Image (cartoon, grey):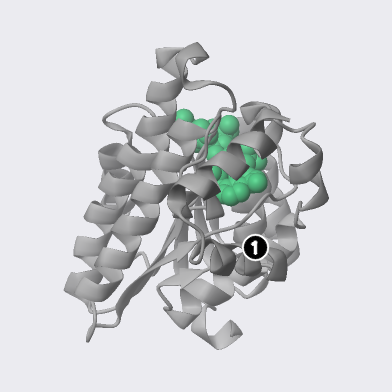
Amino acid sequence: MNSAVSGKLAVVTGASSGLGADIATVLAERGCNLVLVARSQDKLQSLRERLHRDCGVTVEIVPLDLSQADAPARLHGMVTARGFNVDFLVNNAGLGAVGPFSAMNWERDEQMINVNIRALHQLTRLFLADMLASGQGRILNVASVAGFQAIPYFSTYAATKAYVLSLSEALHAELAGTDVKVSALCPGATRTAFWDVAGGGSNRVLNFRMMDCRAVAEYGVALMLSGRPVGVPGLMNKLMILLRRFVPRSWAAAVTAAVMKE
Ligand SMILES: NC(=O)c1ccc[n+]([C@@H]2O[C@H](COP(=O)([O-])OP(=O)(O)OC[C@H]3O[C@@H](n4cnc5c(N)ncnc54)[C@H](OP(=O)(O)O)[C@@H]3O)[C@@H](O)[C@H]2O)c1
């Protein structure tokens, strides 16, 4: 796997914590240079120092709020102005919010839609064009098992991840016959700061199923390099996705409502 990554360049969004930081670490350990993006400059800075020191790779940091409309174009402009040739784009930045739809404030929903959908869509569009021009590249879009069905009390988040999953699968099919691949990583509940931000971290069912973040990151990097369209890490998550195929969508939503209400 190292030869496929060493000396190449990856842009990783949401790299200041959780899955993004671990994906960046997995890539750096295999010799990949990095452009790391998130709002928290201090966290990006310390990750840059650690990865440069421990792995000897070049790491640029770009502190950026991806909920801002011009952020994807600014990131792409900065990367191209520096003459970087991006081999891997990891669209990982994202956030969720647990609660009844009618009780959520619009600013929070808008931020979720802007980061999870808008920024991911635009970054995919911008970097995909470069990859097609150079004839190769990999894009890893971080979706979720939540993208496979409606999730009451997590409705907007699940809808954003359904968008990511659908877009990624469609692009993967469009790109057949090229050496440019788009993959959707669909983790289930994973131990990161995500649940502190989203709320719902005390949910017993979710806690019971939490996967280790590093294991999900390793799975994600392997998925991206394989160029497969969709990957669901963890046996439990795979079984749940399989089971859902045999259950009416309305039943799945009703069962999930009970779990999320807990
Ligand atoms: N944890 C789970 O259970 C789980 C399950 C399935 C899918 N996912 C997905 O995995 C991805 C990573 O989440 P995580 O679990 O690693 O959570 P996390 O630890 O909270 O990380 C989220 C990352 O997104 C960045 N981010 C959030 N808002 C941003 C903004 N406006 N601009 C730029 N960056 C922003 C955060 O950085 P700053 O705050 O520094 O900006 C952080 O680096 C997300 O897309 C999430 O939906 C997570």
Q: Secondary structure at mark 1?
A: helix
Task: Inspect this view and state whether residue 83 appears.
Answer: no
Query: Is 76 positioned to the left or the right of 98 in the image?
Result: left
Query: Is 176 positioned to the left or the right of 30 in the image?
Result: left
- Picture residue at 48% right of the left edge, 78% below the top: 225
The x, y position of residue 238, in whole percent, is 61, 69
Q: Nearer the viewer, residue 118 or 30?
A: 118
Q: Which residue is mark 1?
A: 237
Task: Inspect this view and state whether residue 92 appears.
Answer: yes
For badge 1, the amino acid type reads Asn
Q: Quadrant of residue 203?
A: top right
Q: Quadrant of residue 174?
A: bottom left
- Picture residue at 70% right of the left edge, 30% below the top: 200
The x, y position of residue 60, in whole percent, is 51, 50
Query: Is 260 positioned to the left or the right of 90 in the image?
Result: right
Query: Is 213 positioned to the left or the right of 98 in the image?
Result: right
The x, y position of residue 133, in whole percent, is 17, 71
Is ligand 1 within 8 Å of the beta carbon of the residue shown at mark 1? no
Which quarter of the image is occupied by the N terminus?
Answer: bottom right
